[in-house]
Amino acid sequence: MHPVEQNLEAVRASIRAAAVRAGRDPATVRLVAVSKTHPAEFVRIASDAGQPAFGESRAQEALEKIPLLPSGIEWHFIGHLQTNKIRRLLPHFALFHSVDSADLARQIDRIAGECGLHPRVLLEVNVSGENTKFGFGPEEIRAALPALLVLPHLRVAGLMTMAPYSEDPESARPVFAALRNLRDEMEQHAGSPLPELSMGMSGDYATAVAEGATIVRVGSAIFGERPGAPVEG
């Protein structure tokens, strides 16, 4: 068995165990295998092993990789989305995890209308308040959400966040709990479901599952470390 297959099997088992410990149905947690910087061959191995969804964060890399792989793969864009890349990326991705401003949401909506598309998106929230992270602040997203929910071509499916990097996965728990609580509050006030919570990466996805994640983004635990890069997915 290829190491990617072994790692994938271990991550799936860990997700199932975390869900059971939390009293959740493991089927309510989806794994996105973060394949950015990894070769198409690794994606094919994971896909052949039954992994349906993969995450990319670099537009050019994704646009070169996607045509090399089976058409049935579900692609998620998880990186910072630049407005000049929207038109090229929209047709290829099932979900955009990182809509980090109202202006970006309006730009996606406008271009989607011109292309006849209705993309599903997640709104990125900078729960921790780190200056190095993109995203709405909690108060900012509370104010912006009503207008974003009525954009005609955008489908707001939920929220996403990234916890500060730490060796201790428990340090991320307050961030994940805060996102879940914010989502619950906004659902109640907006009267509109926000079913998806994308949170948790290689170092802390089990904690995220315990706090209600419906999508976890796991890269290095499946594909191995990226040369010269910190653990990000």
Image (cartoon, rainbow, N blue to C red):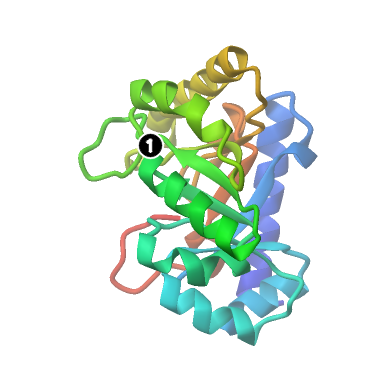
Circle 1 residue: 168
Is residue 75 among what the camera can see?
yes
Residue occupying image coordinates x 70% and y 59%: 9
**Location of residue 151 with respect to 189 vertically, above or below:** below
Query: In the rendering, at what x and y percent does residue 126 appear?
Result: 35, 34
**Location of residue 120 with respect to 138 vertically, above or below:** below
Is residue 101 among what the camera can see?
no
**Location of residue 215 with respect to 108 vertically, above or below:** above
Q: Amino acid at mark 1?
A: Asp
**Which one is nearer the viewer's eye here, 123 or 151?**
151
**Does residue 166 appear to the left or right of 5 in the view shown?**
left
**Location of residue 183 with respect to 133 vertically, above or below:** above
**Which one is nearer the viewer's eye here, 50 or 119?**
119
Q: How many marks?
A: 1
**Does residue 146 appear to the left or right of 22 in the view shown?**
left
**Does residue 172 appear to the left or right of 67 in the view shown?**
left
Could you tell me which quadrant the N terminus lies in? bottom right
**Which one is nearer the viewer's eye here, 159 or 230?**
159
Query: In the rendering, at what x and y percent does residue 87 appear?
Result: 49, 67
Query: In the rendering, at what x and y percent does residue 214 appear?
Result: 65, 38
Residue occupying image coordinates x 38% and y 37%: 168
Query: In the rendering, at what x and y percent does residue 56 appear?
Result: 50, 65
Residue occupying image coordinates x 41% and y 68%: 85
Residue occupying image coordinates x 49% and y 20%: 182
**Does residue 62 appear to the left or right of 226 in the view shown?**
right
Q: Secondary structure at mark 1?
A: loop
Check disc 1: other Cα within 10 Å, few if <14, some if 14-19, many if 20+: few
